[in-house]
Image (cartoon, helix red, strand yellow):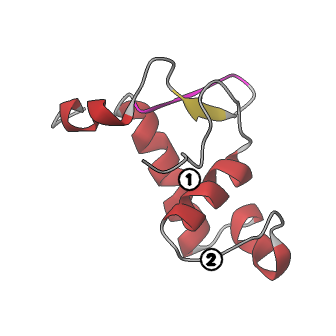
Amino acid sequence: MTEPFLKPGVWYDPDQASCAMVEALGLYHTLGTFGPAKWVFYSANPVGDALADLLARLCGAGVLEANDDGQFRLRPGYTPDQFADIPAAY
């Protein structure tokens, strides 16, 4: 099993959570910094907007949760083996 990009119990700012998704998908390798692609995570654009939408949808599906500061984390108690049990409609 591989190490998750979002560590359980850790709150991530939206740009960090989006960056983790981009790395997990193999779309971009940040090597610990946003580098020249920083604008993707900090401005309105099709990719940044899609990542923000995906974060919201993962919250709605019960995989992630958001706090009042706009940060995200894996829902406490969520494990990868629960992936097949995500509701079909939310």
Question: Residue 48 or 86: which is nearer the viewer?
Answer: 86
Q: Which residue is mark 1?
A: 52
Query: Which segment is the magenta one?
Result: 63-68
Q: Which residue is mark 2?
A: 28
Q: Is residue 50 left or right of residue 60?
A: right
Q: Secondary structure at mark 1?
A: helix
Which amino acid lies under the numbered mark 2 shown in the image of this protein? Tyr
Figure check: 42 above or below 59 = below
Mark 1, other Cα within 10 Å: few <14 / some 14–19 / many ≥20: some
Residue in the picture at 69% in, 34% down = 71
Please state, as top left, top right, bottom left or bottom right, where the C terminus lies in the image: top left
Which amino acid lies under the numbered mark 1 shown in the image of this protein? Ala
Residue in the picture at 40% in, 43% down = 57
Question: Nearer the observer, disc 1 or disc 2?
Answer: 2
Give the image location of residue 17, x and y in percent: 64, 49
Give the image location of residue 53, x and y in percent: 48, 52
Give the image location of residue 65, x and y in percent: 53, 27
Residue that extends furthest to the left in the rendered view of this protein: 88
Indicate which disc, 1 or 2, sits on the residue closer to the N terminus.
2
Mark 2, other Cα within 10 Å: few <14 / some 14–19 / many ≥20: some
Residue in the picture at 73% in, 66% down = 43
The reply to whether callout 1 and callout 2 are in contact (CB within 8 Å) is no
Q: Is residue 76 magenta?
A: no
Q: Secondary structure at mark 2?
A: loop
